[in-house]
Amino acid sequence: MGFLQIASAHKAYQTPEGTLVRALDDITINVRSNEFLTLLGPSGCGKTTLLKTIAGFEDLDGGDLILEGRSLKAVPAHRRPFNTVFQNYALFPHMNVSQNIAYGLDVAGVKKAERDRRVGEALEMVGLAGYGGRKPSQLSGGQQQRVALARSLVLKPRVLLLDEPLSALDRKMRETMQIELKNLQNSVGITFIFVTHDQEEALAMSDRIAVLSHGKVQQLGSPNDVYDTPANEFVANFVGTSNLFSGRIVENDAARGLVTIETANGRRLIASGRDFANGSAVKMVLRPEHLRLVDTGEFEGAGTLEGQVKDVIFVGSVIHVHVDVGFGRTAIVHHHHDRAGIRNAIEAGANVRIAYSPSSAHLIAAERG
Amino acid sequence: MNRILSSFKIFPSVFNIYGFLFLAFLYMPLALIVLYSFNANPINIAVWTGFTFDWYRTIFGGAAVETTFDSAFSESPQRIFEVVKNSFLVAVSAATIATVIGTATAIALARYKFFGKRFYQTLLLLPILIPDIVLGIALLVFFVGVGFELGLLTIIIGHVTFLSSYVFVVVSARLAGMDTTLEQASADLGAGPFTTFRRVTLPQIMPGVVGGFLLAFIISLDDVVITYFIAGVGSQTLPLFILAMMRRGLRPQITALAVLILVFSFVVATVGLLLRNRKS
């Protein structure tokens, strides 16, 4: 089947307070060869635990890990063809950069001439040629990060595991490293499994994203899938910003593929959708960038909402307009502006109309409870 | 207002004086013994009669004991050399064995989970707290009970029992400060447990291991109470030897010996500190 199968992985912890935490609760992912897979989720969602069990630092309570048909359950960490880039890099402080990178080759018994050649190549690859003699403590965070990458990649692992490797870097450096990592993954052709809590990072770099929460896979798909068609409320809220409106389907216009939902207080909203029967409880997801502030009037075919501006937040490229739409909900609109004049025309207290294309509204089944 | 300000000015000088007095209290006796070790007066060491190297020369054999006034009370260089040799043999052996045991135990307790770990940890600290005299008697009873002939070997075994605890404490502190992901990284890069220990863990905790060894070495070197109980007839160590000399009164040669021990301890402590600072 897959290249690396994570087959209904289970792991639970007993906290010191005595409660049982299901860090991994029946996780199944088929990791593809040469893909950039991101495990995305908030802290405590199980993503790091999953990475550690793949690396072999922790055992599974149940389920299996299968690499090309061979179970890895009985294989200790040092015999798995995987390498890890640690969150704090974990460079050996008593060795210089070259010795750090050569460590795995040395342990594997690679001859000195071959070792030196490959260490040189690895340094070249991460742009640190000439830094071999330095100690890790003499390098910047970004440079240490590259050494950690080189130390792992020099062993040509089947899978490279990355545990929030960019979280310790500042924003600019992080953006540079995101591009570098993605390019590196393309050029070396190794499967990357990348753990992060940063959804922007996940969207920017991944071929596929597995969104995790409470030890379960909430959604597994391409960045576009996860962003445009979130599988549930958790994914809609965690990945990007969402305006969520709950309601019940009251009209189903199958010919035009439009449904109308009615909120608890009787407001009617339209959305594209065919998969829901009349009467079913749904949540409508509207991304802030799909909402437009428009003049009052009728808009053929568009969904509309009226409300009063509560806050206007200028963030540079867009303005975030928080609109009280009346039924205890606030809609967030990312309003694009081309001139300061238009920007200034939107003020708190103003009555505005919001329009959206029904096709940009995504419906998810409302969860019980 | 002025009063408050001026009292702030007075306080530092009061503290300075207090600090000076405290240091004087600590170091005056040591300064005095160094001074008296060069005092030519053979009868009363507290009365200065002139400068001499004689007492040091008697220790190193530079002056025959018989030629000095204090000959009746002095020991021969051969005898001193023998007890110093005993002391070093005991201290080096006991500290080495204790370092191996203490380090291995510290690693086991820091890295592995097993039944009764906390209990074991407490037991390990007890030898430091148990009064020396109790430990000495207990060891004597044990050695006599199992039929061990008292000698250097029993002193070494006795010292290892409590020195292991000291090494354990020092190495544990170092291990607690070590980043455990380094060991994971080593395993991740393909190194088995032994290679990881030799190439990652040991270099990281080396300052602690060396520090533990030096501490054990110094404690063993000047232990009197425990050694007194478990030393055999022909196996005197330097501290026991000095204690025996003291029975005939505080002679100048003893002050010279004491100063030599002081200098040696100082050198060992300095080396230990230098090693520690270089690593961290």
Image (spheres, coloured by chain):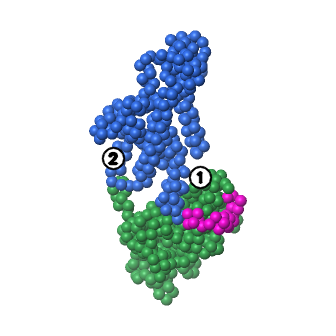
| Residue ranking furthest to the bottom | A255
Task: State the residue at coordinates (65%, 52%).
Answer: A138
Q: Which residues are magenta?
A: A104-132
Where B230 falls versus B172 (above or below)? above
Chain designation of label 1:
A
Q: Nearer the viewer, residue B179 or A265?
A: B179
Circle 1 SS class: loop
Task: State the residue at coordinates (59%, 52%).
Answer: A94
Where B187 falls versus B238 (above or below)? below
Where B256 falls versus A256 (above or below)? above
Q: Assign the magenta stretch its main secondary structure.
A: helix
Is any atom of residue A47 visible in this view?
Answer: no
Query: Quick one: which chain is green?
Result: A
Task: State the residue at coordinates (47%, 43%).
Answer: B96
Chain designation of label 2:
B
Disc 1: which residue: A94
Q: How far across and how far down the image is residue B178, in percent?
A: 51, 50
Q: Residues within 10 Å of mark 2 (few under 14, many from 20)?
A: few
Circle 2 SS class: helix
Q: How far across and how far down the image is residue A192, in percent?
A: 56, 71
Q: How much space separates mark 2 and mark 1, taking CA atoms?
A: 34 Å
Q: Nearer the viewer, residue A18 or A300?
A: A18
Q: Are marks 2 and 1 in contact (CB under 8 Å)?
A: no
Q: Residues within 10 Å of mark 1 (few under 14, many from 20)?
A: some
Q: Is A188 positioned to the left or the right of A236 in the image? A: right
Q: Is A318 positioned to the left or the right of B132 in the image? A: right
Q: Residue A15: name its quadrant.
A: bottom left
Q: Which mark is residue B119?
A: 2
Query: Quick one: which chain is blue?
Result: B
Check disc 2 and give the amino acid type: Phe
